Amino acid sequence: MRLCMRTRLGPLWQGRTRALGLALGTALLAGTASAGTPEQVTNIFKPLSTPAESISEVAWLTLAVCAGIFLIVGGLLVYTIIRFRRRAPDDGAEPPQIYGSNQLELAWTVLPILIVLVLVLVTARTIADVQSHPAPPDALHVTVVGHQWWWEIRYPALGLVTANELHVPVSTTTRRQLTFLRLESADVAHSFWVPQLAGKTDLIPNRVNRMWIEPKQVGTYLGNCAEYCGTQHARMLLRVIVHAPDDFTTWVAAQHQHGVAEAQVHAGRDVFFATSCVNCHTISGTAAQGKFGPDLTHLMSRDTLAAGAAPNTPATLRAWVRNPHTLKEGSLMPSMQLSDTELDQVVAYLLTLK
Amino acid sequence: MVVHEIAPASSITERLHRLVVTVDHKQLGLMYIATALLFLLVAGSMAAVIRAQLAVPNNGLISPHVFNRLFTMHGTAMVFLVGMPIIAGLMNYLVPLMIGARDMAFPRLNAFGYWMFLFGGLLLYASYLAAPGLAGHGSAPDVGWFAYAPLTGRAFSRGHSTDYWILALLLSGIGSMASALNVIVTTVSVRCPGMTLMRMPLFVWLMLVVSGMILLALPPLTAAQLMLVLDRFLGAHFFDTQAGGSAVLWQHFFWIFGHPEVYILMIPGFACASEIIPVFARKPIFGYPAMVAATVMIGFISVSVWAHHMFSVGMTPMGNTFFAISTMLVGIPTGIKIFNWIGTMYGGKIRFELPMLFCLGFLAQFLIAGLTGIMLAVAPFNWQLTDSYFVVAHFHYVLIGAMLFTIFAGMYYWYPKACGRMPSKALGLWHFWLFALGFHLTFDPQHVAGILGMPRRIYTYDVGRGWEIYNLISSVGAIFQALGLLCFVANLLVSLRRGALAGDDPWDAWTLEWTTTSPPPEYNFETLPVVRSRRPLWDLKHPEDPDWQYE
C-alpha cells in the first residue's frame, strides 16, 4: 500500500451518464421503425428477399452481441468513474499503485477471442450462402449497366432493353423465382443497392460482378446508386418492380411492342429524328438506335424521369426536354434549344411511347 | 553548463524570420499544431455548409458541383491537413521531452517535413483558384477523398482539379514520411541514460509504432498517385478502364494506405489517453507490457485489413472471409486497451480536470465506435452498411468522438507545458459540453439514416424516405459543435495571456517533460536526466517508495 502526503482540492464529479445507450438505442429503434408504403421503405431490417433476409439475420445476431458488450463494458466504465471519483474531503493520499494483473489481462484477451470466433463462423456461413448460391435453371438473368447517372437494364434471353426500373417476377413458396444480375459499368464505378432485396454490389467498368435477388412480395422497391459516381450521384435512383408471374408475362409482352407513331404526332416525331436525339436514344422499330442514353421505346411506362429525378408526367417531361439541367443539374443530356412549338410537338410524340 | 541564450525577438519580421528558419522541435511542433488547427477551422466550416445543405430534403442551397467539392475537400483536408499534422506536432513536441533528449535526431529534416506539409496544404486549397486552368474546367477536386478510378481519369475529370489533389498529397505525404522517419531514429537512438525501451512512456511507444505504420502505409499511396499522374499526363493505362486498366487496382492501392491510415490517426489518440488517464486517476497505467504488445499487434494487423473497405466490389467468398476475420482480430488488442484504461481508473482517485473529461468522453465514444466497427467487419452486414450514412457515422465516431476528443485532452494537458499558463477551466467546460452535445446530435442519428438506406455523398434527397428528421437533427448538432470549437479556440488564445501561471508540473504528473520549465528552454534539459523506472517523477516525489523497486 502506497501513501503520499499531498492535498489538491479538485472539483468533484461532473456527472456523465448521458453517453450511455446511444448507438444501441438508435439501432434498435430503427429495427422497429414503422412501415410506410412499400416504395418508401429502404430499411435494411425489413428484408423481403432471401439475400437481404440472410444478412438481416446475421446483422441482428451481431447487434445483440455488440449490445451485450456495450452494456457490460459501458456499465463497468460508468461504475468505475462514479465509484472511484475523488471525493471531498480528500486526505491527499495516493491510492494503492497497481501495475497490472496477468490473470485479469488474460481473461479479457481470451473472452474477445471467443466472441470473434463466433462472429467469424456466422459471417463465413452467410458469405457462402449469399455469394456461392448457384443459379437454378429457371432463373431470370438480367444485365444491369451503370451509366452516369442512370441504369441500363437488359434482358438478354427476352431481347428487352429498358432503363432505371428493373421488372422481375415474384418468388412464391410454391414456385421459387430467382433473378440473377450481371453488373457492368459503361463509365465509372457505381453500386447497386436496393436495401430490402440484397446488400450492395458494385458496378465496375471493365469488370463483371454478379448478385442475385429473390423478392417475396409484389410491389415497388426503392434503391440508390451507392458508390460516388460524379455530379449527379444523388439522382441515380433505382426502382425494382416485382410482379406476380402473370403480370410479369404481360409486362414482357408489352415491352416487345415497337414504338409506333400515331398520325397526329408526326410533327413531333420529325423533330425527334431531325435533332440529335437519335444519336443517344433508341426507339425500337425506328431509325433511332442511339446507345448513350436510355431506351425510350416505352418511356411512358416508367414511373419516373431521369433515374428518379422527377415523377414522369407530361409537365415534367416537357421541362426535362426543354432543359434537363433544371431537373438534374450536370446531366449529360444537353438542352436541344427547341422552340415552344417544337417542344410541344416532341413531347406529344414522346407521350405516345407507352 | 554554459548555455547560449537567444535574445528575444523584437520586430515582427525578426519573429517571422525565426519561424521560417527554426529547427527547434518544440517550435516546429507548435507550428504543426497551429497550422492544423487553422485547417480544422476551414475544413470544419466546409462540413457546416454540407450539413446546411442536407438539413432539409430537396434543398437548393448549393449546387451538386459545389457539394461534391466540399465533401472531397473536407475529407482530404481533415485526414491529411488536420489529423496527420496534429499527430506530427504532438510527436515533435513531446517525444524528445519524454525521452530526455535535447531535440529530434534530425532537426533539419523535421523542419523540411513541416514545410512540405504546409505547402502541400496550401497547394490543395489553391485548386479553388488555379485548377480551372486555361480551359476553364473544374475547380477544387470533386472525386471524393479516396478518389476512386476511373472518376479521376482524364475522361471524367477534366481540368486540373485532380492533379492538384494528387500533387498536394504527394507533397504532404513526403513531409509525413520525413517526420515518421525522424521519430523512429530519435526514439531508437537519443533516449537519455536509463531510458530502456520498456521504460519509455506509452506515448512514445505508440508514436514509434505509428511512425513505423506511416513508413509502411504512405509509399503505396505515393506510388498509386504517381501511376495516376502517368495515366493523366503520359497516356499510361494503369487505372484507365477504357483501355483495359483496372479500377479495382486503385482501390487496393488506396486502401493498403487507407486502412493503416485510420489506425495511424487513432493510435496517437490512444497515446494521449495512455498518459492522461493514469495521471488523473493517480495510478500507473494498468498492464504496461500488454498495452505495448496490443499496440504493436494493432500495427501488424492493420496492414492486412484494407479490403474490408471493398466488401462490395465483388471479391471471392474466400477473400471476403479473410478480410472479415482479419478485421475482427483488431477488436482483440483494442479491447485489451479499453479494459486496461478502465483497469487504470479502477481503484484510483479520479480528478475531473479538463484533460480527463475529454478522455472519459473518448472512452465512452470509442467503445461505440469500436462496436459499430465490429458490425462493419461482418462482411454480409457490411454489404448493407457500406457507403451508407452508417459508415459516415462510424468513422466520425472514430475520428471525432475518439481521436479528436483525445487530441483535445492532449491539448489541455500539455498546454501549460507549452505556454506556461493554465487553460481556463470554465471555457474548457463549455467547450466539452457543447462539443459533446453537438457531436452526439450530429452523428448518432446518422447511424439510423444509414440503416434506413441513405447513401453517403448525396447532395440532396427526396421527401418520404424517412431520412428527414435524422438529417435535421444532424445539422442542428453542427451548430453546437461549432460553438464548442469556438470556446476551444478562444480558450487557447485568451489563456495565453490571462491563464494562471502553470509552473513546471501543474498536474502532479510523472513523465520527464514535467521536470523542465514551462515552456521548456530551447535545449530542454540543463543536464540530461537519468531514469530508473517508467515514472521518473514518481521516484523523485516518493523516494521512500520508488517505482524501480517494483519494475
Image: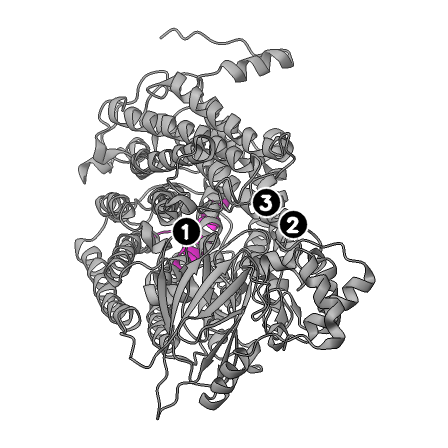
Label 1 resides on the chain identified as B
Spot occupied by residue A85 in the image (x, y as percentages of width and height): 42, 55
State the SS at label 1. loop
Q: Is B43 placed above or below A272 here?
A: above
Q: Nearer the viewer, residue B317 or B171?
A: B317
* Residue visible at 72% across and 55% down in the picture: A336
Q: Quadrant of the C terminus of chain A?
A: bottom right
**Residue under pointer 3:** B69
State the SS at label 2. helix
Part of the protein shown in magenta: B348-367
Spot occupied by residue B203 in the image (x, y as percentages of width and height): 34, 37
Q: Residues within 10 Å of mark 2 (few under 14, many from 20)?
A: some
The disc label shown at residue B49, or none? 2
- The amino acid type of the residue labelled 1 equals Ile
Asked if residue B331 lies left or right of residue A309, the reply is left
Spot occupied by residue B414 in the image (x, y as percentages of width and height): 46, 34
Q: Nearer the viewer, residue A303 or B193?
A: A303
Of the numbered discs 3 and 2, the one sitting upstream in the chain is 2
